[in-house]
Amino acid sequence: MTAKQTIEAGKAILGIEFGSTRIKAVLIDQENKPIAQGSHEWENQLVDGLWTYSTEAIWYGLEDCYANLRKNVKEQYDCEIEVLASIGISAMMHGYMAFGPNGIATQRTLPSENEKILVPFRTWRNTNTGPAAAELSKLFNFNIPLRWSISHLYQCILEDQPHVKDITYLTTLAGYIHWRLTGEKVLGIGDASGMLPIDSKTKNYDATMVKKFNDLIAPKGYPWKIEDILPKCLVAGENAGYLTEHGAQRLDVTGHLKPGCPVCPPEGDAGTGMTATNAVKQRTGNVSAGTSSFSMIVLEKELSKPSEMIDMVTTPDGSPVAMVHCNNCTSDINAWVKLFKEYQELLGVPVDMNEIYGKLYNHAMSGDPDCGGILSYNYISGEPVTGLAEGRPLVVRSANDKFNLANFFRANLYATVAVLKLGNDVLFKEEKIKVDRITGHGGLFKTKGVGQRVLAAALGSPISVMETAGEGGAWGIALLAGYMVNNSKGLNLADYLEDVVFAGNTGVEIAPTQEDIDGFNKYIKNYEAGLAIEQAAVANKN
């Protein structure tokens, strides 16, 4: 089939992912190749000290993203999307979306939706949950990160927030959108593992931890138990419901899209990143590097002990994964690139952002391997891995450092993966974890070879990048939607990706040079020593 025939026959598959700065839709054919895409730019807001997106922004973003996809299809193929083979919804993981009958109705809430959001959506970026995460980590003997849903919930309980007693449903952003499109209160197991720890044997929330939590909050007398308000866990390949008439109208306000197509389990961006990089098999890993960054290593065995730097989550089919999650990655270096864009505009030179990124990133690699002594802390927000509850972006240098453009930008590139290195050193040096392949994807890798080389130096390991790296999580969730309806041979997810989707393609690999490794190690030693500067900046600037 041609792409047009695929769309007109209702065989195309839709994946939509809500990222931190962009909502992206990708339409794929039966060969898993992207044939159309749409997007919508958005930004989080800091409201009453908490990072959030309004429900109005969520639904307007979804509608506009889909409208942009429709426009792309119309321009390329002169046809309409009326029937889809399947749909998948993905979003940034974790955070807190609590619903109940007495919540705050919004202008875009339909009368039929009798469960309203109780407090504004609290995203993964918030770091106000320290007391809750610390207490739960001790209770469970398991690292519970600040951004996990259970941390947010328990922090609300510690603060006696009045809405908690009214909760009837607690979910993530992906789970919320899926629920409104299908009516099903379910969640893919990878995203669910960012709500409450998962037992990979039962493919469900850890029963021991569920009991401990219920016992912990029993004196509060809430009318619910934790298992009553969490979404049901589903693994990749399971049916997670069907697009309702109401859901079809929410996606396509023009009314062309018909209801009834199956929808796969909603997943978090970590799970779609693993899928998009063919990294769900044991001894494989991937690094996603955009607004935030995280590495995922699929484990052969459990870690010897909990670590505050390592989060234990799962693949979309429930295998244990060691995750290092960093709140900050490319936002600060993007701000510096925009500064150079402004300078170029002052000179009256035409601006091509891809050219600016390419010139600056490639020039950075001509700098000294240790960045000439320059340090960069890219902390737009707090960074739990290094113990910072808030962030202050900083560039630090001494009078004797080699301050030039190449070293400056190299230091900022190193900063994008510096915290990631600190966490992965625990895995590779202390836990002796072995990995056969690490694949990178996300915005950091768009300038060919540069981000890849930096990450290889940081981890001391070869890094592969595929041509599809730029497609990201929207393509990943589309693949999971395709796995649900097109897996005629009954393959497990790892084999389906290896044999059907990627067919042996492992991408282009770059191995680090010893000079780059030594330079990054020197940089990171100075970086760790200089964290006191960042801490002082946070403490002394409102």
Image (cartoon, grey):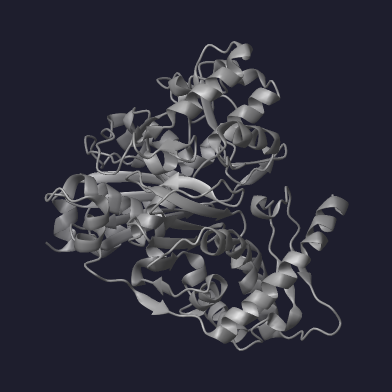
Q: In which quadrant will I find the N terminus? A: bottom left
Report the residue that reaches farthest toward the bottom: 366
Image coordinates of residue 511 in percent, x first then y, are 45, 80
Image coordinates of residue 349 in percent, x first then y, are 62, 84
Nearest the eye: 470 or 378: 378
* Total numbered badges shown on the rendered structure: 0
Residue drawn at (62%, 72%) of the image: 414
Nearest the eye: 284 or 485: 284
Image coordinates of residue 238 in percent, x first then y, are 25, 38
Residue drawn at (68%, 63%) of the image: 378
Looking at the image, residue 83 sits to the left or right of residue 267; the answer is left
Q: Quadrant of residue 496?
A: bottom left
Relative to 434, say whether 166 is above or below.
above
Residue drawn at (43%, 42%) of the image: 191
Image coordinates of residue 184 in percent, x first then y, are 34, 28
Relative to 324, say whether 365 is above or below.
below
Q: Is residue 404 visible?
A: yes
Q: Is residue 342 visible?
A: no
Nearest the eye: 84 or 437: 437
Q: Quadrant of residue 532?
A: bottom right
Looking at the image, residue 214 sits to the left or right of residue 392; the answer is left
Q: Quadrant of residue 418?
A: bottom right
